[in-house]
Amino acid sequence: MATTAPRPGGSARTPGDSGARDRTPAALAALVPRLREICGADGVLTDPSQRRVYESDGLTYHRSTPGVVVMPTTTDQVAAVIRLCAEHGVPYVPRGAGTGLSAGALPHAEGVLLVTSRMRRILEIDLDNECAVVEPGVANLDITRAAAPHGYYYAPDPSSQQVCSVGGNVAENSGGAHCLKYGFTVNHVRGLEIVTPAGEVVELGGKAPGAHGYDLIGAFVGSEGTLGVATRITVSLTRSPEKTVTLLSAFTSLDAGGQAVSAIIAAGVLPSAIEMMDALAIEAAERAVACDYPAGAAAVLVVELDGPAAEVDAQLERVTALCADAGSFETRAASGAEERALIWKGRKSAFAAVGRISPAYIVQDGVVPRTALGEVLGRIAALSAESGIRVANVFHAGDGNLHPLVLFDDTEPGAGERAEEVSGAILDLCIEHGGSITGEHGVGVDKACKMPRMYDGASLETFDLFRRAFDPAGIANPEKLLPTPRLCGERPGVRAGVHPLVESGEAEQF
């Protein structure tokens, strides 16, 4: 979840935040000369005002001033910084462009914030192997810009793709509007160069798709910086389709829009994207970017079709008819690139646009089966009515990935807490209907305490054992992703005692 402001009366309590906001902790201060030798004087920030720039990611509800900020430019520098941290037992937190929405890059007040934003070279566009090799600080959209003249593009496209970095996309396994047809980041990563929490440089995969053996790339993508730092990334490029058509269809109710989504998928049509926005989200987008959506719509669908021209033409006719059958009162197809861009501008500006209709808001991210969309949206409306907290819905309807925006006035006493309760209740709804607490924003700090709602103790323990195989010292982005007793009030599991395998001498417990 994310807000435009911290908890009323002050920032939220965060892991590792000792309150040391005006000076670098003494243990770190002793390492600063070494860090400057590694990254250069301009690559290490210790001034309080500079460090505060990095106190949160896109989720401003959680804040913590980093002990020191380092900005390496090479793999060797990243490895040297992490080895120094490992040698002295200092925690480090990787950070890309800072657009994350789960506090996954929340700094540690007594640790190093390792910012990869200066590592932004596109190292290679390999057309023969249909892939690109990039550094982690490269903006997502820049890969497409580099590949487009050759007839290719990079398919994963988060709404923040103009600014979000590929390294962050790897950490969170980001999706985007077109993940319905093309999949998430993990489906497009072929190879990784990573620096482990011990400071070792390791190669996973390569340019050839489908590496054999354990799927370590699959494990690393989405691990939120807890298994190491990616310093070079090889991604697949996708051929640009022969034809792309974007439709905008308006409905008098969310239910009618949901019926259209189900009908499209049931008809065997697989659009590259099906997005839905409700009346509140439409109102915000109109105020922000004047996207010219149909007046009076309670919901709109943005449907994009791509592929061979003949196939797209046939699908266009079919989808238009299905939307009409579901009750659409207006369906229009973009007449060219400019109109297509305007349709998408309304959808992709929705998160920020909500600031036009509410002084503060929480961005939530959960998933439900597509067949449960209608019921869950109805329950969200009921929660909104009962609490007096408005909720704007904008989401990836094709795969049931919800992004409800919970609106509140942060100057009103107790409003932030009520909004947080509604936000948490929405996640509970997702779990109740067989869904997930996140589709693409990650777990980070914000949802770690919800993990026991989805996984039993044995599963969480297995996750932790896997993490500790990479990071036995617990210095890589600590207190993220998995719940901890200190933060979540959970009863300690087998970590509190002796694991049976340790007792038998078959394993070592760290």
Image (cartoon, rainbow, N blue to C red):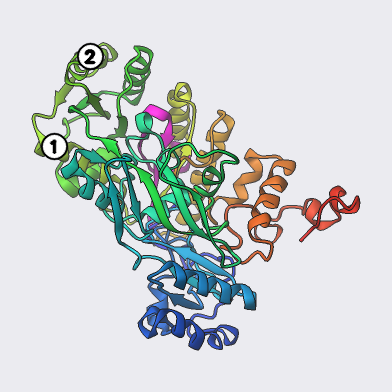
Q: Is residue 53 visible?
A: yes
Q: Is residue 353 visible?
A: no
Q: Is residue 408 magenta?
A: yes
Residue 319 drawn above or below residue 435: above
Residue 361, horizontal then vertical, whole percent: 38, 52
In front: 470, or 391? Answer: 470
Residue 299 drawn above or below residue 481: above
Residue 412, horizontal then vertical, whole percent: 41, 59
| Label 2 residue SS | helix
Residue at screen point 78% across, 55% down: 495
- Amino acid on which disc 2 is placed: Ala
Residue 324's label in the rendered image is 2
Residue 292's label in the rendered image is 1
Going from N to C along the chain, the mark reached first, 1 or 2, is 1
Residue 478 drawn above or below residue 324: below
- Amino acid on which disc 1 is placed: Asp
Left or right of residue 307, residue 41 in this image:
right
Q: Is residue 25 magenta?
A: no
Residue 214, horizontal then vertical, whole percent: 60, 41
Whole-number angstrom distance, CA of label 1 to CA of label 2: 20 Å
Left or right of residue 117, residue 413 in this image:
right
The region drawn magenta spans: 385-409
Question: Quarter of the image containing the C terminus?
Answer: bottom right
